[in-house]
Amino acid sequence: MGKKAVILLSFYFLVTVNAYGKETIKLGVAGSHSGDLASYGIPSLRAAELVVKEINTKGGVLGVPVEILAEDDVCKPEIATNTATKLISRGAHVVLGHICSGATKAALSLYLDAKIIVMSPSATNPELTQSGRYPNFYRTIASDDAQAKLDVDFAINNLKLKKLAVVHDKGDYGKGLAEYAKKFIAASRKAELVLYEGVTPGALDYSALVQKILRSGAEGVIYGGYHPEAALIVSTMRKKGMKTYFISDDGVKDETFIKVAGSYAEGVYASGPKDVSKNPLAIAALAVHRKVYSAEAGAFYLNAYAATQCLLTAIEKAKSTNYEKIGAILHREYFNTPLGKISFDRRGDAIGVGFSMYQVKNGAFVEIK
Amino acid sequence: MVIRVNTIEKTVNWRFGNLLLVEVGSFILSLLWQYLFARREKMTKNNSAKYRAILSRFFSGKIRFVVGFAVLLFPFLLSTYHINVLTTALIYVVLGLGLNIIVGLTGLLNLGYVAFYAVGAYLYALLNHHFGFTFWICLPLGGLVSACFGLLLALPVMRLRGDYLAIVTLGFGEMTRLVLENWSDLTYGPSGISGIAPPTFLGITFGIRGTMIYLYFLMVAFCLLAIFLVRRLRDSRIGRAWVAIREDEEASRAMGINTSKAKSIAMMIGAAWAGMMGVVFAAKTTFVNPASFSFLESAMVLSIVVLGGIGSIGGIIIAAFAVILLPEYLRFLSDYRMLAFGCAMVVMMIFRPQGILPYHRRTYEFKEVHR
Amino acid sequence: MDYFWGLFISGLTKGSIYALIALGYSLVYGIIELINFAHGEIYMIGAFTSLIVVSLLLMEGMTGWGALLLSLIVAVIYAAAYGFTVEKIAYKPLRQASRLSPLISAVGMSIFLQNYVLLAQTPDFLPFPNLIPEISFLKRIFPLMTPAEIAILLTTACLMVVVTFIVKFTKMGMAMRAAAQDRMMALLLGVNVNRVISHAFILGSSLAAVAGVLIATHVGRVNFYMGFIAGLKAFTAAVLGGIGSIPGAVVGGLVLGWAESFGAGYISSDYEDAFAFFLLILILIVKPSGIMGRATQKM
């Protein structure tokens, strides 16, 4: 009996001893830090690390250092709920994340229950702010209705296309964008929607889809989704000799897309966050990344940089980590960030950020004015 | 292992260190293998009687009280994360017990068990989302609807045996997932359903930690119920019918057992358990989407049943805990978790196929009394 | 009409790949009545091996046909070695055991191989360079087919002939058929059944490797998970055609490829994967032994 008691007791102690360390402000960073969409999540993690390091050298927030709690959700909604639970139970005060709209949506109700503010640098699904269900959610990127409008307007007005196909990956982000695209095409009365299809991500090949696009006679494809599928669809189309225009979203505007699709990526259009590289804060942020990680910053880096700054500055200005107080500051104040001077509207969308169109020219994305 | 190619970055990574590792590693492993092989006969011999004696001594009287007390005390001493993991393990215990009825007792190789799990989860998600049905109403409903699903699967596979049965059930599982993914009007597709209400206790809603503790106790209760039911079923008429079907279907039919009815009942009961667990799962994670219900889940539950010992309750409990808890707590090995999993399955099958804690029907020995 | 033929050809292409993999399943099942779950992973390993070899060769400056063929040979040898080893480790010790044990072992092996490649390489989708050059006169004759598709069809057709030849006219083929018919009897008559089984695995794995390389060239990317889905569908094809039957595997593969292609093209591309299983359940209810299987099912 004695031996068993000792074993049991030591087990208890082992599992209940948490890090009873110093008080810190805990910034949860949730996103795809591994997996095929890691190229979207890792730049945000790095942005948070750099901002936090700078703030800590200046004395931290409210006099205590900031601690990063990083959790990986691989951009999968079902894992995101676990991630959220973990961050909540680890005591995160605010959360930077998640990266993908689907994952963010899955986790938000948990954060709402726990009264934690969540700011995403990249989740663009409009419903997240427009439904009003998540008053704890903010983002430093414009939402997809703006993006879809840009894509459709570009296709119709700039490329002068009359027959459009809209394809999506059935996920929250891709399908959301596609639905808006469909709406805007119908409203424009200048072009016809000849095909509206969903594809399964991770499928072996999309030859059936490409056949359908060919048959529909579409002059351009507007794709809502991420770069792995887009790369495969584009290469399949080009291999079949199709010259159809391909216009996509910020889930495709990524270095990795060009690397995977290779020469087939040439000429592909994708919308993405407005280019702010002339902004001095942006230049500084990019330089820091180059110095510390010896590489160029990836997708959404500046958005995440801005978001981290907003969150931590808001805590400082609110003089507390209270949910309502931080929210009030975020709505009221303007923040100086690499994206410019931004604030947040009633619903949580950022005021002062937008999208622009890019095209792959000579192996790199170039902004089209 | 030696060469790693990345055609995205256009790099080739030569890792000659790994070459040495592979050489030496395979040499040592092959020696180990041959040694274990030679001892294989001794390993498969049944020491279960000895283990059972030890276990029953362990769980008697005072120890039982202490363990029970510990189980009750656990959630209040641990963080939410640990409770979450334990609850997940308990869910898999009940799933394992449910599949045990189909595979272990009746011998119907069902590789699509996850379909029933999904049905329960989505039932609760949809009813809660559209009509606000609460957890306690949906729990029995989930069981009922899943049982119907079980019947639906049982009907076409009645005539199939062995491997054909396996592949059809696998297909059934995959088809369920595909329907969930694509019938977006009904199921909201890959984006899933979020904001599912956690269970309430007489109208009181808890916070996150409270819900977790509540679910933990609920699962403990379910486990005990499941263990009780499986024990009773095993010794009942229908249980014996199942075992007879497993051993030899023709003979059982010849003996007058209605095999169709027995098989259907087995499928339905197993499905009902999975359905109820699905409801609990949906309540626990407050979010469901089709990706949580892939073949991998079925494979995991099947391995729990097989690794634990087909038909053995204690073994299944141990296996479920091992399969769920080990990867969580040995986080530093998390990358290698699936690798170890696959390896363990192969090794267990070769060296100890009867499972961790094999089940033996009670035998009575008649000893000659010398007069 | 073009649409129809486009679908027909992509169905034919997919079906040929399924047929190649299904052959491996059938060969093995015929003799030891085991669903080799790890077979899909062998297919994936073949694709990965060829990716590695091709990348190396491209760095050295070799391009086109040569690189592809060389990588094919290496992939086949490598995959055959894997198949042989997997059999010796995971299946041979379990030959006397019940139905369930080797099946679980196979699933375990499949998981092991998948994650082994995942860890040794990368979880990303790696692009496979397009090595088959455009041959202009072929483009005029078969305007709807890409060179890769033509290559797949030709290769598969040749391999089918080769396999049929092996099974029908060589001593090893005869031994395989004998072992498939009645293993104990074959053993008693002096056939080295262990050797025969190893040969079946080697043959099956080689075919799967070829399929892997072909698909990698055609689709243009490889990923550690590709073996799982392909393996599942190919196994469905094998059962569809009658497991254990060689022509059955081919017929099953083609039927499945067409069903998927036409189903996706005319009905709905969402449920593409479901058509395979739906068809399977249908056939199994109507004719449980598959399209070309033996009427009396060996239990």
Image (cartoon, coloured by chain):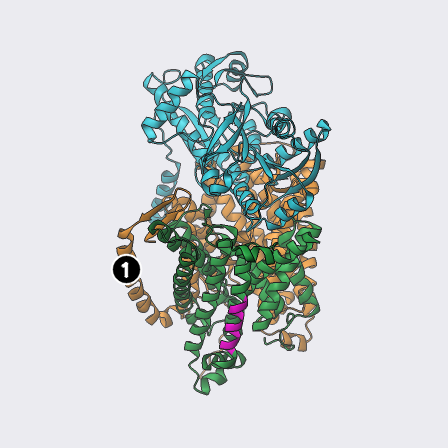
Chain colours: A cyan, B orange, C green
In this rendering, the count of numbered labels is: 1
Image spot of residue C16 (x, y percent) = 57, 62
Q: Main secondary structure of the magenta part?
A: helix
Above or below residue C78? Residue C196 is: below
Q: Is residue C110 left or right of residue B246?
A: left
Question: Which of the two residues, C37 or B368, is positioned nearer the viewer here?
Answer: C37
Q: Is residue C108 left or right of residue B30?
A: right
Location of residue B35 by image quarter: bottom left
Above or below residue C176? Residue A248 is: above
- What residue lies at 40% left-to-right and 29% top-to-bottom? A297
Within 10 Å of disc 1 (Cα), the crowding (few <14, some 14-19, many 20+) is: few
Toward the bottom, the furthest residue is C189
Q: Inspect the magenta stretch and tell me whether residue C159 lies in it.
A: yes
Residue C6 seen in render? yes
Question: Which of the two residues, A85 or C8, is positioned nearer the viewer here?
Answer: C8
Question: Which of the two residues, C127 or A286, is positioned nearer the viewer here?
Answer: C127
Question: Which of the two residues, A12 or C160, is positioned nearer the viewer here?
Answer: C160
Tell me the kind of residue under disc 1. Glu
Location of residue A175 by image quarter: top right
Image spot of residue B326 (x, y percent) = 41, 49
Q: Which residues are magenta?
A: C157-167
Q: Is residue B78 left or right of residue B110?
A: left
Above or below residue B77? Residue B179 is: below
For disc 1, the chain is B
Q: Quadrant of the C terminus of chain B?
A: bottom left
Q: Inspect the magenta stretch and tell me whether residue C135 lies in it.
A: no
Image spot of residue B31 (x, y percent) = 29, 66
Residue under label 1: B23
Image spot of residue A61 (x, y percent) = 39, 17
Residue B299 seen in render? no
Element under disc 1: helix
Location of residue B262 by image quarter: bottom right
